[in-house]
Image (spheres, rainbow, N blue to C red):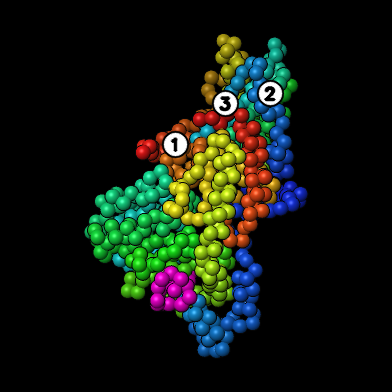
């Protein structure tokens, strides 16, 4: 198997210029972030933060200062409200399972939307095995939540609602403040969790103003190192641990704290927020150039998700009709442009992206979808290069399809 | 289920980049289709069969992943010049998989679909003729059944797709 992959890599030898746009699934880590992390592996703060010696106290100081910074970026003033976890998946698992188990005496109904990320969707499914019921609120053709249905679904049994501020696939910015209000009006003891990973560093928001109880952020989604996330748990909200082991400074997550990753995530957050307006303008300008380029060079394309200010600035999700997405990702890779697709083949599941299906895309439209995210490190030249490669790649795949894939 | 990378072989990659016998054939004796755009996996074969029931020419079009394109392409190369009987009896999905140097197990269905489509073409040829030899059984073969199942599954799943009313 590895031999085959070596062959695939060899096929890329002629690639002269590379543009990485698959920032949904993993990202390169900028030099500044890596350099900030390096001293924490061997020079300082490599101790266990719960122990009574200098490297331990250094780690304690570092982690607490990082928590303080992250809590401020999220609009919290209390560093204890931040729990570092090994990623977004773990933070979402902790939020849903931890809050559901700790509050099951209040009720056993959980509400999510149809377009929540897999690590919320699957946890909500799992909770059914523990006697919880899960209700999924539909969205419209741009991915906006049906607030009336949400209001109608909340009852005295509703223990938890989980709705992301920004959808990770199609970039829809939900009216989250309204959604929280709708939920709390119906049942003030219902907890509200939001996966804020795709909003963090892209749109301004403040968790205190939003009045959410729990919120997830992810390190790699803002160009920090993989393997770290954080869950905001509002002071006073009851959450059960979901893993057992030695508890350290993070009272909801056992195990030894990963100080270098925490430092990397904090540095990545600082870089994202220190020049926030310029950063998002850069993402938006390049994203718009990319989408405009696609629409003016190719026919039979559809934008998935909303346009304008109701869409997060980095997200481009486009369906190329009569063009299967996995084939297109490989064709583009061989030309140095790296993207992902919501096609069933690419995801290796029977069904294409649940998000695209939920906004009413036909399966054949979802199979031809490509997701791209710009960052502040991309340049105009990168997008120009993508547009030199993309139309011919789409046309070659469409040439293989001929009249076969027409619905 | 784990989600391993798709370690396509050199042969799959070569056929993906330079598919053999690609395109529509205007004077095909039979045209057969398997799969459905809803599965993201669909193959059309155009087969030219001569009076001696030998496959003279065969071309394909494919809506699908790299494995789908490669298996369809290799099938056209394998069956060209074969008698219909030989193609029916000896071109199995396992042989197709071998010919492309192996496939990730999640992609076996691509080879199955390609062989299913060719068996459909042969069956269709004899239906058009009005008479079938004894080696074409009435019951569907494994590959034809699988193709049918995939099509029905896609229909079932996509029926659950929600209908959005245009505003």
Determine the residue positioned at 56% across, 36% down.
Answer: A299
Q: Is residue B32 above or below residue A183?
A: above
Q: Which residue is mark 3?
A: B33
Camera-nearest residue between A209 and B58: A209
Q: CA distance from mark 3 to mark 2?
A: 13 Å
Q: Earlier in the sequence, mark 1 or mark 3?
A: 3
Q: From the image, tell me which residue sits under label 2.
A: B58
Whole-percent x and y of residue A47?
Answer: 57, 82
Q: Earlier in the sequence, mark 2 or mark 1?
A: 2
Q: Chain of mark 3?
A: B
Residue corresponding to mark 1:
B158
Which region is colored magenta?
A: A68-89
Residue A310's spot in the image, x, y percent? Answer: 43, 53
Cα separation, mark 1 vs mark 3, equals 19 Å
Question: In the rendering, which numbered label is found on residue A209?
Answer: none
Q: Secondary structure at mark 1?
A: helix
Residue appearing at x 59%, y 38% in the figure: A298
Answer few, some or many: residues within 10 Å of disc 3's Cα (few below 14, many 20 plus, some between 14 and 19).
many
> Does the magenta-highlighted stretch encompass residue A77?
yes
Q: Nearer the viewer, residue A10 or A376?
A: A376
């Amino acid at each position: 198997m590895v031999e085959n992959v070596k062959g695939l890599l060899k096929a890329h030898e002629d690639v002269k210029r590379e543009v990485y746009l698959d920032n949904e699934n993993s990202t390169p880590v900028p030099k500044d972030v890596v350099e900030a992390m390096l001293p924490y592996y061997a020079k300082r703060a490599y101790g266990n933060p719960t122990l009574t010696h200098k490297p331990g106290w250094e780690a304690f100081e570092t982690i607490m200062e990082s928590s303080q910074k992250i809590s401020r970026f999220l609009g919290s003033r209390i560093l204890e409200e931040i729990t570092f976890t090994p990623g977004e998946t773990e933070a979402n698992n902790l939020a849903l399972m931890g809050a559901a188990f700790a509050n099951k005496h209040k009720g056993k109904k959980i509400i999510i939307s149809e377009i929540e990320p897999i690590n919320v969707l699957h946890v909500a499914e799992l909770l059914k095995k523990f006697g919880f019921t899960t209700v999924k609120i539909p969205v419209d053709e741009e991915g906006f939540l049906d607030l009336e249905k949400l209001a109608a679904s909340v009852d005295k049994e509703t223990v938890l609602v989980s709705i992301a501020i920004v959808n990770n696939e199609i970039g829809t910015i939900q009216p989250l403040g309204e959604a929280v209000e709708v939920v709390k009006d119906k049942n003030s003891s219902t907890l509200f969790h939001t996966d804020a990973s795709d909003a963090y560093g892209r749109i301004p928001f403040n968790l205190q103003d939003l009045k959410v109880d729990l919120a997830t952020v992810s390190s790699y989604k803002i160009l920090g190192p993989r393997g770290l996330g954080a869950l905001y748990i509002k002071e006073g909200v009851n959450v059960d641990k979901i893993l057992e082991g030695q508890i350290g400074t993070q009272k909801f997550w056992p195990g030894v704290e990963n100080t270098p990753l925490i430092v990397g995530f904090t540095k990545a957050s600082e870089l994202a927020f220190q020049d926030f307006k310029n950063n998002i303008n850069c993402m938006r300008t390049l994203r718009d150039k990319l989408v405009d380029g696609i629409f003016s060079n190719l026919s039979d394309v559809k934008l998935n998700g909303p346009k304008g200010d109701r869409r997060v600035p980095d997200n481009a999700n486009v369906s190329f009709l009569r063009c299967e997405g996995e084939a297109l990702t490989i064709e583009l890779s061989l030309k140095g442009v790296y993207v992902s697709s919501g096609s069933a083949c690419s995801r290796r599941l029977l069904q294409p992206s649940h998000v695209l299906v939920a906004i009413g895309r036909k399966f054949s439209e979802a199979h031809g979808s490509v997701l791209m995210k710009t960052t502040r490190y991309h340049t105009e030249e990168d997008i120009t290069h993508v547009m030199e490669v993309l139309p011919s790649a789409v046309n070659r795949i469409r040439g293989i399809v001929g009249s076969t894939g027409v619905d | 289920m784990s989600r391993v990378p798709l370690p396509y072989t050199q042969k799959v990659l070569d056929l993906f980049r330079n598919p053999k016998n690609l395109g529509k054939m205007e004077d095909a004796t039979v045209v057969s289709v398997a799969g459905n755009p809803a599965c993201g996996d669909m193959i059309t074969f155009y087969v030219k069969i001569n009076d001696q029931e030998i496959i003279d020419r065969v071309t394909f079009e494919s809506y699908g992943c790299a494995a789908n394109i490669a298996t369809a392409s290799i099938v056209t190369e394998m069956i060209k010049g074969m008698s219909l009987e030989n193609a029916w009896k000896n071109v199995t999905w396992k042989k197709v998989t071998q010919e492309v140097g192996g496939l990730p197990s999640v992609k076996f269905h691509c080879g199955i679909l390609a062989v299913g489509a060719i068996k459909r073409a042969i069956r269709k040829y004899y239906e058009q003729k009005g008479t079938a030899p004894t080696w074409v059984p009435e019951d569907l073969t494994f590959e034809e059944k699988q193709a049918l199942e995939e099509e029905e599954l896609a229909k079932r799943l996509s029926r659950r797709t929600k209908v959005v009313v245009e505003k």
